[in-house]
Amino acid sequence: MGKARIKCERIDQKMNKEMTSKFFEALTDLEKEKNIGSDILIEKIKSGIEKAIKKDYPYCENIRVDIDPVTGKLDIRILKEVMDVMYVDDPDNEIFLDEAKVYDPNIKVGDMVEIPLDPAKFGRVAAQNAKQSIKHDIKDFERARLIEQYHDKEHECVSATVQKVEPATQNAILTIDKNEVYLVRNEQIPGETLKAGDIIKVYVVGIANPDRKPSIKISRTHRELVKRLFELEVPEIADGTVEVKAISRVAGARSKIAVYSKDPNVDAVGACIGPRKSRITSVVNELKGEKIDVINWCEDPAQFIAKALAPAEVINVVLSEDEGVRECRVTVPDNQLSLAIGNKGQNAKLAAGLTGYKIDIVSESSAKAEAADDEN
């Protein structure tokens, strides 16, 4: 019996010597890599090891896994109740007294004897199961943490640091709160060149695949980024005095933003532009020189459409609605036609996006000619 006990102790010592140092090195690396607290990580690993032991000991009801990074202790045992009969009814959870004394000479009937697991018996398969289970649990934790961390950031503007730009795809890898996030090329502002070390503002569109492998979707082209940037620069928008009613954007080229003041003493457009254009300049600089038109919102659709077509002058606006489609016909001076339409139709497109109307723009001479034809 004494020789058996010594053999058991040697197995226990061998397990700790061979596994402990490497195990805790890996634990420290994992803690740094995944940015997970050691207490949480240890609980996940204990759970993974317990699941793996269950593969080899499916009917064992008592498993104990102790992990102490301070003392460097890794202890894996199963527990069985000591019986005083020759034959036990449940050998997976019960043990005869004489056999139990191999592990503890002072053990008594009714006690629970702790049996250290031999790594050889634990086996390669069990170790692999532990690894897979731990990996799965950590992924679950990372997914839950990522969703929780970014839940309050959805639809907000946040600062991000460019870590790397992939040469082949031009996709950028950013860090936000120590998490790596992809900013794909088509979500970057056309014409901008990002480089490592740049600190930029991005709009958090949302969380993709929350139930599987979640990822944070961010954008520099989203129209809401313009609104959030103005909120950061304009106190009157942040406190609710000035309200952003509508935004239309062609990223990298031009944006139009319609604002309304709830206080008659506050000029909504002036508040957005700021002293010496300081506020709007900050937004333009963040958007890499994108032009921004700020106009006053008004309830009258015709007046609003006329304002939306600025800087072009508008003679009149005729509204119509056909099968739920809101349309309008806008007449402008002959010398303002190209300005109203804009380069490649950009101004008209932005005005349509801002107002929600399909806009047909005609020159004053064309409108008069059509009217004359109708009279004839």
Image (cartoon, rainbow, N blue to C red):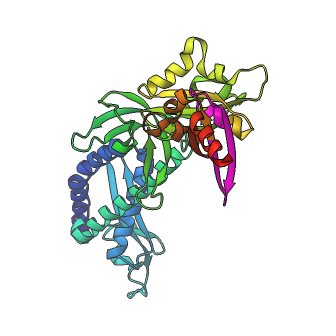
Q: Quadrant of the N terminus?
A: bottom left
178 sits to left or right of 16: right
From this view, report whether residue 103 is shown above or below residue 96.
above
Camera-side residue: 362 or 225?
Answer: 362
Residue 100 x/y as whole percent: 36, 73
Q: Is residue 356 visible?
A: no
Extent of the magenta region: 305-329
Q: Position of residue 193 (x, y in %)?
A: 31, 31
Residue shown at the point (28%, 69%) measured from the top left: 126
Q: Furthest residue to the front?
A: 376
User: Does any portion of residue 67 appear in the rendered image?
Assistant: yes
Q: Residue furthest right?
A: 264
Q: Nearer the viewer, residue 100 or 129?
A: 129
Q: Who's the residue at 51% across and 30% down the image? A: 339
Q: Please name the residue shown 37% across and 53% down the image.
A: 67
- The x, y position of residue 87, in whole percent, is 38, 88
Relative to 58, say whether 261 is above or below: above
**Residue 238 locus on image (x, y percent):** 65, 29
Query: Which residue is depicted at the point 43% across and 54% down?
Result: 214
User: Which corner quadrant of the image does residue 187 belong to?
Assistant: top left
Tell me the quarter of the picture where residue 84 sits: bottom left
Q: Is residue 316 magenta?
A: yes
Residue 257 left/right relative to 220: right
